[in-house]
Image (spheres, rainbow, N blue to C red):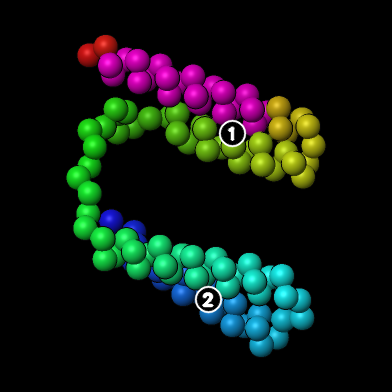
Amino acid sequence: MRRGALMLGAWGLWVGAWAIVLLIWGESLAPLIAFGAAALTATLVAGYLVISPPRADPPRVLPDTSVAPPLIGAGLALLANGLAFGLWLILVGAEVAAFGLGLLFAEMRRERAR
């Protein structure tokens, strides 16, 4: 997890740099607090992940190639966008996420049967 932790730390530092820009030129306090909190949280979590010992990988229950996780993610993204664009997009997102969950459960059942 070292590479992922370093990327998270770099992202935290980047957001921290934008928080400093907001501190200098920003007029509102809310974005400064949001950016600062995000930067601090990301940097602290990355630091913890760098110094903690790596865990052993659990056995995989899904195949390496699966369509279900991207479908679930896309459905949840559509659901979140539906809050701004209306009920129709919430329903489309729920349908896509439900289809992805159905595929996920079918793949897990197929793997357990082997």
| Residue shown at the point (72%, 81%) measured from the top left | 26
In this picture, which residue range is highlighted in magenta?
92-112
User: Is residue 3 in view from this perspective?
Assistant: no
Q: Residue at x 21, y 58 (%)?
A: 53
Q: Please tell me the numbered disc located at residue 16.
A: 2
Disc 1 is placed on an element classified as helix
Q: What residue is pinned by disc 1?
A: 75
Q: State the separation of the CA atoms marked 1 and 2.
A: 31 Å
Q: Which amino acid does label 2 sit on?
A: Gly
Asked whether disc 1 touches disc 2, contact meaning CB atoms under 8 Å apart, the reply is no
Query: Residue 47 location, x and y as percent?
Result: 35, 68
For numbered disc 2, what is the local secondary structure? helix
Instruction: Please tell me how crowded label 2 is: few (under 14), some (14-19), or many (20+) other residues with Cα within 10 Å.
Output: many
Circle number at residue 95:
none
Depth check, mark 1 against mark 2: the one in front is 2
Q: Is residue 27 left or right of residue 66?
A: right
Do we see residue 17 in this rendering? yes
